[in-house]
């Protein structure tokens, strides 16, 4: 299943079309098939000074005309204050021999239900996005890359010592980022849908960035990779850190928006605006597949 991103722009004071909302919310995820629109589940609306943007609407790819809608264009979307008036970037071509897909941290531990009921409820939107959007899209992207000869690589958080003495300081501090994931333990492994092939490289890391403290930069250099397509979690943590490190090493980076997630959509979209245009280009899966076709 492949998803694309829909932007719906409404000027301040305009009435939101009824097909985009139900009785409880103003902003919904919808499934679009030829001749039919169905509500799946919903999130909050994002409001700005002079217009409302229904930003989080995901569609199954289908040839269907949708009024009042503009399909996301990577050249103009996710513009931060710094790049609001910047020129549009040139077209992207991802030559398979010079491109690698890097899938980051889609591990069992992050899909486990929380022991506390209230905390589990708080994380449900993340679980839903992972299961309904990120994992299916990432599987599709992996399959496409394998088929067209693009190198597929993985990175996951895993310590080498059972007691985690080899972890970086950030993973030893109390709180959400306290991570003790010995490399052979089940919760450290990738989710079942994301299964590296025998000849595909997996980087083990005890840091946010997949480059810091690993030999990934050297591997990419030795393999003649110039472009890195990034998917995984969390957008505002390990994805962002890895993207910045890759950019500093002069790699061309593309982040696949609907193959990534943060704990909340607000965090996800904010971080994409921060890193886009300077450290990477942010694009939807359908657009990235187009880049790979040349």
Image: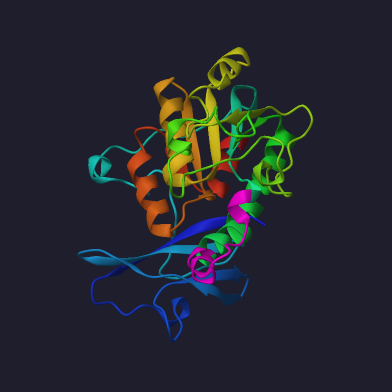
Name the residue furthest bottom: 23
**Does the magenta run of residues contain 154?**
no
Relative placement, left or right, of 198 versus 118 is right
181 to 245, vertically: above or below: below
Q: Residue at x 44, y 32 (%)?
A: 169
The image quarter in which residue 186 lies: top right
Quarter the C terminus occupies: top right
Residue lying at the far left of the rendered structure: 49
Residue at the far top: name it. 222
Q: How was the colour assigned to the protein in this rendering? A: rainbow
Question: Looking at the magenta stretch, what is its main secondary structure?
Answer: helix
Q: 26 or 156, which lies in front?
A: 156
**Residue under the image location 46 percent in, 83 percent down:** 22
Picture layout, residue 131 above or below residue 139: below
Q: Quadrant of residue 96?
A: top right
Give the farthest residue toward the front: 163
Residue at 40% x, 69% y is 68
Observer able to see residue 137: no
Give 251 or 84, whichever is nearer the viewer. Answer: 251
Locate the N terminus by quadrant: bottom right
> Bounds of the magenta span?
109-123
Where residue 257 appears, x then y in whole percent?
Answer: 49, 48
Front residue (pair 263, 148): 263
Which residue is painted at 43% across and 27% down in the image? 245
290 over 119 or under it: above or below: above
Q: Position of residue 192 (x, y in %)?
A: 74, 49
Q: Is residue 4 left or right of residue 7?
A: right
């Amino acid at each position: 299943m492949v998803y694309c991103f829909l932007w719906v722009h409404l000027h301040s004071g305009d009435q939101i079309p009824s097909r985009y909302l139900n009785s409880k919310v103003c902003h919904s995820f919808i499934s679009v098939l030829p001749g039919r629109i169905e509500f799946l589940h919903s999130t909050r609306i994002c409001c700005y000074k002079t217009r409302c943007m229904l930003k989080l609407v995901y569609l199954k790819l289908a040839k269907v005309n949708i009024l009042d809608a503009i399909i996301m264009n990577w050249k103009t979307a996710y513009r931060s204050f710094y790049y609001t008036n910047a020129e549009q970037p040139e077209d992207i071509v991802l030559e398979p021999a010079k491109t690698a897909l890097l899938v980051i941290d889609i591990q069992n531990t992050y899909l486990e239900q929380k022991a506390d009921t209230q905390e589990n409820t708080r994380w449900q939107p993340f679980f839903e996005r992972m299961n309904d959007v990120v994992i299916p899209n990432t599987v599709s992207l992996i399959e496409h890359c394998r088929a067209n000869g693009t190198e597929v690589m993985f990175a996951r958080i895993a310590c080498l010592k059972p007691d985690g003495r080899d972890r970086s300081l950030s993973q030893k501090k109390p709180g959400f980022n306290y991570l003790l994931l010995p490399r052979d333990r089940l919760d450290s492994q990738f989710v079942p849908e994301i299964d590296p092939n025998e000849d595909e490289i997996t980087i083990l890391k005890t840091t946010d960035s997949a480059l810091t403290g690993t030999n990934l930069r050297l591997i990419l250099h030795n393999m003649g990779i110039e472009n890195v397509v990034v998917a995984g979690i969390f957008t505002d943590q390990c994805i962002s850190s890895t993207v910045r490190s890759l950019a500093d090493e002069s790699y061309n980076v593309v982040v696949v928006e609907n193959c990534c997630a943060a704990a909340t959509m607000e965090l996800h979209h904010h971080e994409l605006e921060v890193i886009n245009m300077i450290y990477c280009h942010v694009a939807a899966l359908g657009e990235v597949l187009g880049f790979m076709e040349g």
